[in-house]
Image (cartoon, helix red, strand yellow):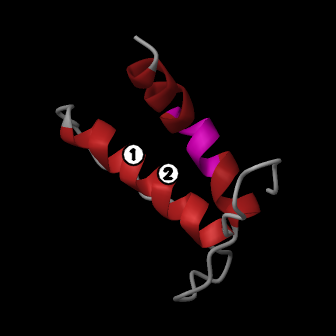
Amino acid sequence: MLASGKRFRSVGAVFSEQLGTLLAVLEKTTPYFIRCASPNNARAPNKFIAEYVRPQLRCGGLVEGIHSMTHT
């Protein structure tokens, strides 16, 4: 994540920024439901596996929905 003239951003910082953007989008909308995603196979606390969650979000249409809301 190093680019010329830019500081290193940790994965946590990137995630936090993306979460803040998502929450800002959600606050501007009227959601009709909440979709849950399982963070890992064992559903163990404090264990987030992005490769496990990403397909759930894509198949559920969440990625496309957010993309369409932010690019209108």
**Residue at coordinates 69% horizontally, 71% vertically from top-left?**
49
Q: How many dots with numbers?
A: 2
The answer to whether residue 30 of the structure is visible from this angle is yes
Q: Which residues are magenta?
A: 56-61
**Which amino acid type corresponds to the residue marked 1 in the rendered image?**
Leu
Q: Secondary structure at mark 1?
A: helix
The answer to whether residue 39 of the structure is visible from this angle is no
Above or below, 29 against 24 in this view is: above
Q: Which residue is disc 1 drawn over? A: 22
- Residue lying at the far front in this picture: please name it: 5
Q: Which residue is disc 2 drawn over? A: 18
- Is mark 2 in CB contact (under 8 Å) with mark 1? yes
Question: Looking at the rendering, in which quadrant would you find the N terminus?
Answer: bottom right
Q: Position of residue 44 (x, y in %)?
A: 57, 88
**Which amino acid type corresponds to the residue marked 2 in the rendered image?**
Gln
Question: Looking at the rendering, in which quadrant would you find the C terminus?
Answer: top left
- Give the prevailing secondary structure in the magenta stretch: helix
Q: Position of residue 33 (x, y in %)?
A: 26, 43
